[in-house]
Amino acid sequence: MAHGGGDKCTFVVVSDTHNKHGHVALPPGDVLLHCGDLTQQGTLTEVAHFAAWWHAQPHAQKVVIAGTLAGAGGRCARRWNPSREEDPGPSWMGLSVRNC
């Protein structure tokens, strides 16, 4: 069932938030889509902050498309450094993220 009980599905689309996601006023909708560049440096700390905010959003379905600072397979591809940070593994802060 669509948001508000109608027969239409509402998408809320954001991108390029670069750690400013907490300042974005999201309207209600059925699907929340983040189209990439959710962090500034791509560190696990930044991703953890994003993930906490993301999971708190009320939208029934949520999709994250990794940008240049986040990678598929559960790593922050360009900035992730295994000598500095623990490998987050396949769940990647509870986000299902894919590069497209």
Image (spheres, rainbow, N blue to C red):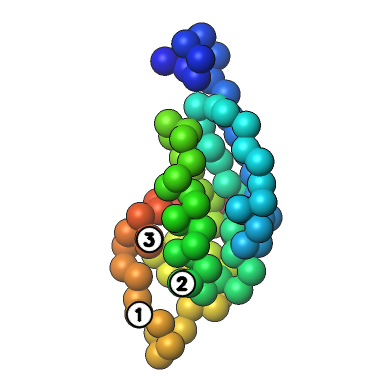
Q: Residue drawn 42% across and 47% down?
A: 55
Label 1 close to label 2 by CB (< 8 Å): yes
Q: Give how far across and how far down residue 52 sits, in percent.
A: 44, 55
Between the residue at mark 1 and the residue at mark 2, the CA separation in whole angstroms equals 9 Å
Between the residue at mark 2 and the residue at mark 3, the CA separation in whole angstroms equals 9 Å
Badge 3 is on which residue?
93
Badge 1 is on which residue?
86
Q: In this view, does 43 lie above or below 52?
A: below
Upstream in the sequence, badge 1 or badge 3?
Answer: 1
Q: In this view, does 60 lie above or below 63?
A: above
Badge 2 is on which residue?
44
Amino acid marked by disc 3: Met
Q: Give how far across and how far down residue 83 sits, in percent.
A: 40, 90
Between the residue at mark 1 and the residue at mark 3, the CA separation in whole angstroms equals 12 Å
Amino acid marked by disc 1: Glu
Label 1 close to label 3 by CB (< 8 Å): no
Secondary structure category for the residue under label 1: loop
Q: Is residue 94 above or below residue 44?
A: above
Residue 64 seen by the camera: yes
